[in-house]
Image (spheres, rainbow, N blue to C red):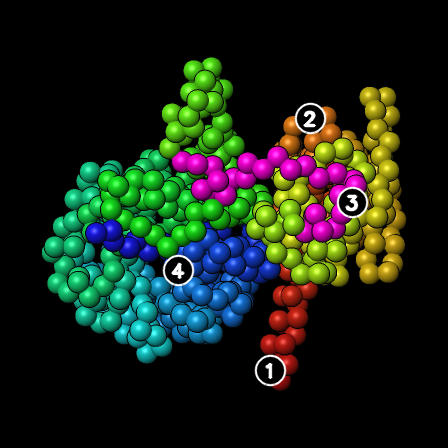
Amino acid sequence: MSQRVYIFDTTLRDGEQSPGVSLTIGEKVQIAQQLARLGVDIIEAGFPISSPGDFESVSAIARKVKGITVAGLARAEFKDIDRAWEAVRHAEQARIHTFIATSNIHLKYKLRMTREQVLEAAVAAVKRARLYTSDIEFSAEDASRTDFDYLCQVLAAVIEAGATTVNIPDTVGYAIPGEWGGFINDICHRVTGIEKAIVSVHCHNDLGLAVANSLAAVINGARQVEGAINGIGERAGNAAVEEVIMALHTRKDNLGFFTGARTEEIYRTSRLVSTLTGMRVQANKAVVGDNAFAHEAGIHQDGMLKERTTYEIMNPAMVGISSSNLVLGKHSGRHAFRQRLEDMGYFLSEEELNNAFASFKKLSDKKTNITGEDIEAVIEEQMSALPHSYTLEYLHISSGTAVVPTATVGLRRDEQLFEEAACGNGPVDAICKAVDKITGINCTLINWGINAVTSGKDAIGDVNLKITTDGVKVFLGRGISTDILEASAKAYVNAVNKMIHVDRTAAAKQTEQKEVEN
């Protein structure tokens, strides 16, 4: 009989800790809503005490995302736990996830605590969380390098204190599958009261073994797997959620496990996370990479034409990769456009549809045939827009091998048009400087990249870039156009809008706090 494995998604917590990733509250809610559509069981929405922005995003997800458990991370300290509960308490199902390191190396060099002190802190943290909710997860950080007998002692104590899930993290990606499977099996047989809790694993990918270790753990008794979409996260990342889901689904005949995931939402979720984080998915990435279902070798192509299953163990449609050849163009109507969006899984409000359709019409004037990938790019760009933002009204570039690159930029904010011109080392640099003049913000462009959404001379250029003013806060911008320079301008303006939005929100919070204090 098949057994259920729960999927704990930490894209918005551990995933956002990837270098250079910084999401707005709206983007985090957007990802959380898509994760709910994917059918993961638990979303770790963030680390509420780490910053006011993290608290606000966790709180927003708890209020807005339905039909899913929302977890907040907390160190084994009362102030963390209280703050986590304040953030998640409005969720339909709220979880507090508290943790403390248990390995000798962490106790000695990081915590500077004895084993007895760590055990006491772990139990006290679970009891504190128990005052708020019955859904409590405890993690023994760096469990894979922890003395086994001591780890069993800690896990038994927190279960007795009220933990309903105990997470065994391979925090530094040190484990290998055979060893790790045995480790989990021993925990399931040695820890007193383990039958009262769900055993979870959180595997990192430093040796490229996170998914393999997660599956080894499931085979040996774990019933919750933690990971992130596209495998993003600290250092080399986490177990890739989509790979875990599809491995369990594809090999259920051998493994005998199932999840509650809707596999057809996998590709869309992967694309959304990649777009909003600016972290490209490598072409040969399992399940969701561009080449995952591509066949070039003649023998493979011949086999595929005769019978798909000769070289494909998964149907692309199973993970949400559409095989539809329907192409829209400048004469396509609003109804056909809406139908295509719904076929792709986008259900927009009337206002959102009107804005998307207007962008589609502008694109259709520049591009003869518009594919599903083009439409996805248009929708995703619309989703990244912020209220009361600057929008690109026009752009004029003078550039060449014998002239100084010059950009004239017109930005509209509300009903007012702002115009400036600037010279630069290249056309993109000139655009950025002209935008800086208009906004009064001097930004540093720290990363710029372009990807062709589809093939052909009229392919949409998808520009992703990152900016900063202080070297600490980094903002991601995205813009699309058949004109690379226009896409660059839109991406830069998008990033500046995010910066302004974050600063405005922070200032409003400070004003509100001062009013409360007075």
Q: Earlier in the sequence, mark 2 or mark 4?
A: 4
Percent across and percent down for residue 325 are: 61, 35
Residues marked 3 and 1 touching at CB (< 8 Å): no
Helix, strand or loop under label 3: helix
The residue under label 2 is which amino acid type? Gly
Q: Earlier in the sequence, mark 2 or mark 1?
A: 2
Gap in angstroms between the C-alphas marked 3 and 1: 48 Å
Residue that protrudes farthest toward the front in the picture: 306
Please identify, in this view, whether the residue under mark 4 or under mark 3 is nearer the observer: 3
Q: Is residue 82 left or right of residue 477?
A: left
Task: Identify the residue position indicated by label 3 in the image.
Answer: 361
Task: Identify the residue position indicated by label 1 in the image.
Answer: 516
Task: Identify the residue position indicated by label 4 in the image.
Answer: 42
Instruction: Tell me which segment is drawn in magenta.
Output: 314-338
Query: Which residue appears at 25% of the width and 60% of the height?
Result: 198
Residues marked 1 and 4 touching at CB (< 8 Å): no
